[in-house]
Amino acid sequence: MDIKKGPQAFSRTEYLRRLAAAKSQMEQRDLDALVITEGANITYLSGYTARSPNDPKGMVVSAQQEEPTFILRKMDVPAALHQTFLERDKVVEYPEALMGDPGTNGYDALIDFLVDVGLANRGLGLELGSLSMRSAQKFMARLPQARIVDCTDVITWIRMVKSDPEISFMKEAAAISDAGVMRAAEVIRPGMREADAIAEILATLARGANGKPGTWTATPFLCSSPRTGTSHITWSEDVFHGDSQVNLEIAGVRHGYTAPISRTFSIGRASERLRRVHDAQLAGLEAALDTIRAGCTCSDVARAVHRTLEARGIKKESRCGYPVGIDWMERTASLKEGDMTVLKPNMTFHLHLGNWMIDEDFGYVISETFRVTESGVEVLTSAPRKIFELT
């Protein structure tokens, strides 16, 4: 029995709009097809959110076809048929025998498809940045007559400006993030294992908020004293201790759309040092929010942060944020001085005033997910901007 098409996150019209934007970029580069291998971009163009990041797969967007063709391993075809808006004949399987073969793999099947449909000697866009060197060399060697153009970030830049339906999912994800923060404030206590606290937080991120469940659990980052100067590490085997600080960074997810948030907790009364850093970083965050509007640049936002922090004796070496949407980060612009990317309505960013490089054993986090508007900014996350002092 054939698998049934599942509920679609977006309408067919929405996906065709995205594909039209991709084809416009192809026309500008005189390309006959665009081969998409970056997972988030496949999600953007089709609705596919199944997770198999190490399995070769690709989506071929042809200038001559309304829908793209999705080539992936046989095991994953039912998920593609169920999740995506694509018609059955646009989902093409390759045999499971190609998995784990040291000589050939799914990219060979994708290349075979390009040859079969007459694209082997045409203009092809490849996301070379998402391919390993060996895989990129495979495309070059097997398609010697093709004019191959690096299109690594073409779809990612299109994704930066969200449609209204995408913004709706970002808001739902943000509400889940807020619920995760508030659950953390309930469960972080002296003597509790960090793992048990994370279990409660993850359960909240999965259950969701306002009747909307999380559809994925992004990796949470948690560190407690004396590890608060460490970034991007997960929980330890330790328990929370009295007078400890806890830094937490989490994200709710709805159909791939991700809204991160960071907050700092103190078990017991926060130290004067932590309060001073919090006040400075909060002022920097608010200065950034006061600056954001359509037409300003990423550099303008970062400059407002740094001026505010420096006036309070704080230095922040890391950037002040990055675009978010499908998955945790869109690899395009950065909220840092010198990035002249102009902000446009419905761009969404993670404004991150995390500062881990104060000392090796001391750092601090606070962040929000926001949407750019014509006249300013809409902050999507809404947990209290405070040090959560817990007893």
Image (cartoon, helix red, strand yellow):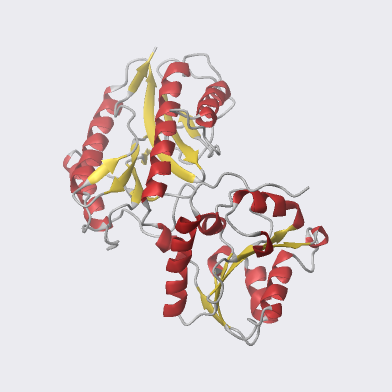
Residue sitting nearer the eye, 207 or 342: 207
Residue 10 at x, y = what percent? 48, 50
Regarding residue 281, the answer to whether it shows in the image is yes
In the image, 172 versus 177, the foreground residue is 172
Residue 158, percent from left and from top:
41, 62
Name the residue nearer the viewer: 88 or 197. 88
* Residue ranking furthest to the left: 311
> Which residue is depicted at the point 63% across and 64% down?
58
Report if residue 153 is visible in the image. no
Q: In the image as oriented, which residue stretches furthest toward the right?
A: 97
Q: Is residue 199 above or below residue 43?
A: above
* Viewer-proximal residue among 152 and 22: 22
For the C terminus, the image quarter is top left
Q: What x and y, as percent, mark residue 290?
A: 18, 44
Left or right? Give the position of 107 relative to 35.
right
Count of numbered badges drawn on the protein: 0
Residue plotted at (44% across, 17% down):
186
Q: Residue at x 36, y 57 (%)?
A: 161
Residue 8 placement, left or right of 157: right
283 relative to 212 in the view: left or right: left
Residue at (40% x, 48% y) in the render: 165
Residue 291 location, x and y as percent? 19, 48
